[in-house]
Image (tube, rainbow, N blue to C red):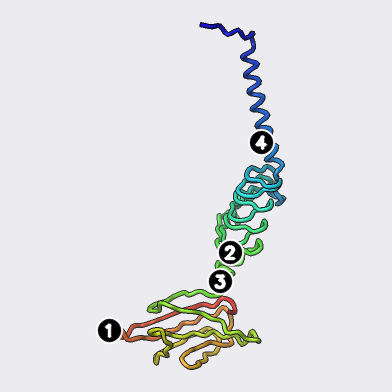
Amino acid sequence: MTKDKRTPGATERCVAKINLNMKNLILSINAQTDSCKVLLEKISGKYTGKCMNGIANGNGKSIGEDTYIGTFKDGLPDGKGKYLYKNGDIFQGYWLNGQKEGKGKFEYTLNGEKCTLIGYWKKDEYIGVTEPDISYRVTSSSGIMNFKVEKKESVNEHDNEITFSIKSAFTDFAPTDLKIDKSSGQIVQTGKKFGITKYFCPLQCQISYTISVAETRKQCRFIIEILVLL
């Protein structure tokens, strides 16, 4: 067996050299991470994640006074993310340019009780459970397969009109037992089309009638809520 001719301490020096190289590598990585800026002051501090041109971009985690875990764009929370406040409150949802924007869930403590707020945010403000970009929603539909909601253009916004028609075999028809219940506005009829004018939002409208199916009368009902002026 050939003896190791290295002088005493050579192995230790070799190990020391490897450790030093590893140390330099780690320091290099940390320096790159620390130089990646997060522009939202309350989470600016220690950042780990994707970086572009010295700015946080992509998935990352930033710890400052508060903590954010999620997607960044141009140094700000943008996209889906989780925000942990220093007092223990948590927001999970969507962000745009460093502000809450879109659907989210906010868990917080009020007077010692755990509370949860679910809904939509706009420019960092909670606006309710209804998506702000939705102008109407169908709350109930029975016996009606297809529908279309249209806006009739008007110079005067107070003259807005919702027009609807009922179709059978691809043609308009006016049921003799048609009933329209509305929360505001006036009902108008033009041929076989119907409408509601001078309404106030939110407007609830229920349309009901019957059709003949196999020698029986089938009940059809459609309930729509107009959230903003169409």
* Number of the label disc, if any, that sits on residue 120: 2
Q: How far apart are marks 4 and 1 (CA)?
A: 76 Å
Give the mark nearer the N terminus: 3 vs 4: 4
Looking at the rendered structure, the kind of residue marked 3 is Ile
Count of residue discs: 4
Q: Tell me: 59 left or right of 206.
A: right
Judging from the image, what secondary structure is the residue with disc 1 in? loop
Tell me the tag on residue 16: none
Q: Which of marks 4 and 1 is in front?
A: 4
Visible residue check, residue 108: no
Q: Could you tell which of marks 4 and 2 lies nearer the N-terminus? A: 4
Label 2 environment density (alpha carbons within 10 Å; few <14, some 14–19, many ≥20): many
What's the residue at 66%, 21% (across, down)? 17
Which quadrant of the view contains residue 130? bottom right
Q: How far apart are the alpha carbons under marks 2 and 3?
A: 12 Å
- Separation of residues labelled 4 and 2 (CA atoms): 39 Å
Q: Which mark is residue 29?
A: 4
Q: Do the residues labelled 4 and 2 touch (CB within 8 Å)?
A: no
Mark 1 or mark 3: whose residue is earlier in sequence: 3
Q: Is mark 3 on a helix, strand or loop?
A: loop
Q: Looking at the image, which residue is at 27% across and 84% down?
A: 214
- Residue 131 place in picture, x, y as percent: 56, 68
